[in-house]
Image: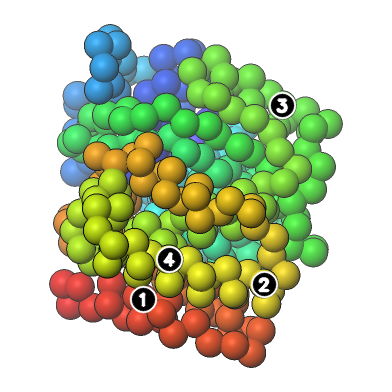
Amino acid sequence: MKIDIIGAGSLGLLLAGRLIQTGNDVRLWCRGVEQCQRLGRDGLTVTYEDEREPITISEDQFVSAPIGEFAGAYLEEPSDWIVVTVKQNTLHNDLPEFLSLLKEEQVHMICFQNGTGHMEMLGGMLPNANLYVAVTTEAAKRKSLTEVIHAGAGEVWIGKWSLGDGQAHSIHNDLKANNLIEVLIMAGFAAFLSNEVDTMIYRKLLINAVINPLTAIWRIPNGELLSSEQRLQLMKEVFEEAIMVYDFCEITYDKDAWDNILQVCRLTSGNISSMLADVLASRTTEIRWINGSLVEMAERSGVSAPLNRWLCQLVEGIGV
Ligand code: PAF
């Protein structure tokens, strides 16, 4: 399968490494010129925290190039799938300029971002595109520009996005999506199709809204959120405000949503959240599309979400 991966962060490198290893034709589009050159010189490596053998991909097994060259290359030689793994801020700020060149194309594009808001934006920009959403619990950490550590095996759930009514639609008869699942499974991912991917997006939004900002502000690994009553109390308050927003917006959530968040903290106890990783690397965080989405959802329903608004301001103020 011919696959374009836009974004060579931890998830982009992990997908690329395994998909190339299993015989797919991958073009990897990077934000930084230096990363492009390093990948073109050294290839890429996926390592594991346990004793599994690393995956080593040599530079002649794939193409790496700057994101800005993607649209031209795609128009000349289209791929079967465009996999978007950049963070929300890159997606909103840098991608529209050249993705809009594909507005006539019937691309098959799948997006792996945390938070919400990006699918609506892409749907408006690419009216002929077949858009899919992926929700993943895979954990990966980038060790260098060319090396990623697979820190924990998770699952990848894929659903179809339809802008018409903002809902995910039946996907099980979708040949292209079934092919992608086969390819992902061959590459070692636990990948599934789902008609309820919108529920999964909101489930993950809830987890991210509670864990990410607090770990980023306190600069602690996920598990340490559980280490004091004071931390748990604030987590619970953020959670309860988010649930209040979901109720107003008529978004369903699991009865055990709170226990689920505590469980994620336990299962990923030693991990640094993606938001803390962004703060530590002085990158823009995804707060605007996580807690910021909750604030917007609340406002659209005529209520306020002061705690989530305050978390947005606190995280946005870090490093300013
Ligand atoms: O964004 C993240 O880091 C992850 O989605 C999660 C689940 C919060 C664990 O670190």
Identify the residue position indicated by label 2 in the image: 247
Residue at numbered disc 1: 312
Residue lying farthest front? 229
Describe the colour scheme in one phrase.
rainbow
Q: Which of marks 2 and 3 is in front?
A: 2
Residue 61 place in picture, x, y as percent:
36, 18
Which amino acid does the dot numbered 4 rest on?
A: Lys
Eye-nearest disc, 1 or 2: 2
SS type, badge 1:
helix
Q: How far apart are marks 4 and 1 (CA)?
A: 17 Å
- What residue would you read off at disc 3? 178
Q: Residue at x 59, y 28 (%)?
A: 191
Judge from the rendering whether residue 156 lies leftward or rightward of residue 264; answer left or right: right
Mark 4 vs 1, N-terminal side: 4
Above or below, 213 against 136 in this view is below
Kindly report the distance in space between the C-alpha atoms of the residues bearing marks 2 and 3.
34 Å
For label 4, the crowd category at 10 Å Cα-Cα, with few meaning under 14, some 14 to 19 and many 20 or more, is some
Of tags 4 and 2, which is closer to the observer? 4
Helix, strand or loop at label 4? It is helix
Mark 1 vs mark 2, CA separation in Å: 21 Å
For residue 182, above or below residue 53: below
> What residue type is disc 1 on?
Cys
Residue in the foreground of this view, choosing between 98 and 248: 248
Type of amino acid at the residue the image marks with label 2? Asp
